[in-house]
Structure formats: structure tokens, C-alpha cells
Amino acid sequence: MMQAQPNSFPPVPPTARIVILTGAGISQESGLETFRDPDGIWAKVRVEDVATPEAFARDPDRVHAFYNMRRARHRTSAVVPNAAHAALARLEREWPGDVLVVTQNVDSLHERAGTTKLIHMHGVHSQARCNGCGHVVPWDGDMSTANVCGGCGRAGGLRPHVVWFGEMPLEMSRIQEALSVCDLFISIGTSGNVYPAAGFVRLIRRIGQAHTVELNLEPSRGANLFAESCYGPASQIVPAYVDGLLNGA
Ligand code: BJW
């Protein structure tokens, strides 16, 4: 297993603006499945059947069943933030400069750990959106085609407020602005397969000046694009990396 070499890089100044991208790997030790690991979600169900607008148009009951199952899992008492989520919340609290977490995850583990400066670029399990009028509402339980939209009063159009393949991720201009001015970019628990998130490190190399770090279980697809890397379980390597930052390593 490769290890970080904290002394090989100059210390990050305390005024540095930090952007952190997270993916399914940070929530794996909280009891949530990743997508592309051998036992991940896409090993059990086809993307084309559940995670595209076409799938929802063709078979909304199937798509609802898939998300109802995952939403229910998120609600169980077994799924709680782990030490990696807690470390990022601590970094936001204690770092003198700006810290923004951009997550691809639709779970709520970052906010439950205490992170407040957070963008859910692929949406959230805890909201529904009307395909007809765009109205977004909080959503806790199961969703079905029988549900009526509180905005336009029509039934059948409510869908999970998540971003499927072929759809535009949320808050992209805010994310691109933060990436273009940040001094440190940390990518955690993402395989680097899905764009535009997978392209952030390349974007920074092109237009930004940030130091780039990958913290993951194993090298991602874009691992060679990062200046620094550390591999291991997020619950171990993220708190260690945050400790290093806060102690001026
Ligand atoms: C651990 C660990 C532990 C495990 N500790 N680590 C051809 C070329 C390029 C792009 C395209 C193309 N054809 C189509 C596209 C675009 C497409 C795309 O990227 N396709 C690729 C598959 C090729 N993208 C889109 O359509 C996106 N929209 C878009 O591009 O709009 C146009 C646009 C362009 C430019 C700017 C703006 C807009 C939308 C993508 C939507 C993705 N949606 C999903 C589902 C969300 C809802 C839900 O949850 O159901 O998002 S798919 C799924 O993948 C989910 C995730 O957020 C996303 C990323 O997955 P992630 O997080 O990386 O998970 P894994 O499983 O892949 O990786 C986990 C990692 O953790 C692994 O590395 C493990 O080793 C590690 N790990 N345990 C630390 N304990």
C-alpha cells in the first residue's frame, strides 16, 4: 500500500482555500455501498435500468423501488458518519481559510457530521423533484407514481432529486469558481470514472494553481494527475491528513 509522504511537500499556508471532492468511498465504512467496487451497486443493477431519465420514463416503478430501497438503508441507525466525515467537519471548523466540500454522494453523512459549506453536485436522497414543474420538496419515506406534486398538483411526475447520467450536475458554476481560485484540492473516495467530477483535477492543472491530493483506498483512474496521494481506508487516512494540515505539516 502506498503511503503519503507528508514531508515531501511544503506546508499548506493557513490562509489556503481548500476544495474537497468526495465520492462513495468516504461513506463505505458508514455501511453504504460504493458503485464500482466488485460488490458495488453497478455489479447488481444496470445503470441503464435505474439511473437515467430514459429509465424513469420507461419504468418509473422500477426506478422508485431502487431509490426507495437505498433511501430506507440511509435511514437505518446503522448508517452514521465515520471518522473521515468527522475530520472534514473539524477541518471546516478549525481551518482559518475557506473550506468547501463538493460531494457526489446523495447521502447526508457530511451534514450529519457537522459540515455546513457543502455542495451536493449529484443531488440528495432526502428531496423529491417534480418532472413537470421542477418543484423541490423534502422527502423522507418511499416515493411512487401515486404521489402528487405540491407545486402543480399533478401525480406521477415526482422523482428523486438526484442527477442521473445525461443530466447536468447541480451548482456547476459555483463549483468551477471555487476550483479556479482554490489553493488545495483534495479528492477522497472517488474512482474518477464519472464526469464532470473526474475532470476537476485536470481543470485545476489547466486553469488553477492548487496543490492536488488524492486520498483513496486505491489509485483512481486519474491518480497520475495528482501531485500527492495516500491510499488506505478513508476513516484512517482522512483524519491523519487533516491532523497534518491543522498541525502545519
Ligand atoms: C474507498 C473505500 C474506503 C472504497 N475508503 N476509499 C464519455 C466520456 C466522458 C464523459 C461522458 C462520456 N459519455 C457520457 C459522459 C458523461 C457522463 C459520464 O461521466 N459518463 C462516464 C461513465 C463515462 N456524465 C454525466 O452524464 C453527468 N452529467 C454531465 O456530464 O452533464 C454534462 C456536463 C458536462 C460538463 C460540465 C457540466 C455538465 C452526470 C453524472 C451523474 C452520475 N450519477 C450517479 C448516480 C447519482 C444518484 C445515485 O446515487 O443513485 O452518481 S452514478 C454514480 O457515480 C453516482 C456517483 O456520485 C458517481 C461517482 O461514483 P464514485 O463516488 O466515484 O463511486 P465509485 O464506486 O465509482 O468509486 C468509489 C471509490 O472509493 C473507489 O475508487 C474505491 O476504491 C474507493 N473506496 N472503499 C476510501 N473505505
Image (spheres, rainbow, N blue to C red):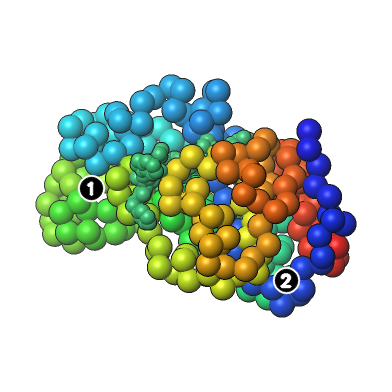
Crowd band around label 2 with a 10 angstrom C-alpha radius: few (<14), some (14–19), many (20+): some
The answer to whether any part of residue 224 appears in the image is yes
Disc 1 target residue: 158
Residue 226 location, x and y as percent? 65, 51
Q: Quadrant of residue 2?
A: top right
Question: Label for residue 93?
Answer: none
Three-letter code, disc 1: Leu
* SS for dot 2: loop
Residue 99 location, x and y as percent? 63, 68
Image position of 222 with respect to 209: above or below? above
Q: Could you tell me which residue is drawn at 18 percent across and 37 percent down?
A: 57
Tell me: 194 left or right of 212: left
Could you tell which of marks 2 and 1 lies nearer the N-terminus?
Answer: 2
Tell me: 49 left or right of 186: left
Q: Quadrant of residue 165?
A: top left
Q: Quadrant of residue 149?
A: bottom left
Q: Could you tell me which residue is drawn at 71 percent across and 63 percent down?
A: 90
Disc 2 target residue: 95
Residue 113 location, x and y as percent? 63, 56
Image position of 52 with respect to 18: above or below? above
Tell me: is circle 1 under 8 Å from ligand 1: no
Tell me: 241 left or right of 138: right
- Residue in the foreground of this view, choosing between 150 and 219: 219
Three-letter code, disc 2: Trp
Residue 71 location, x and y as percent? 43, 40
Quadrant containing the N terminus is top right
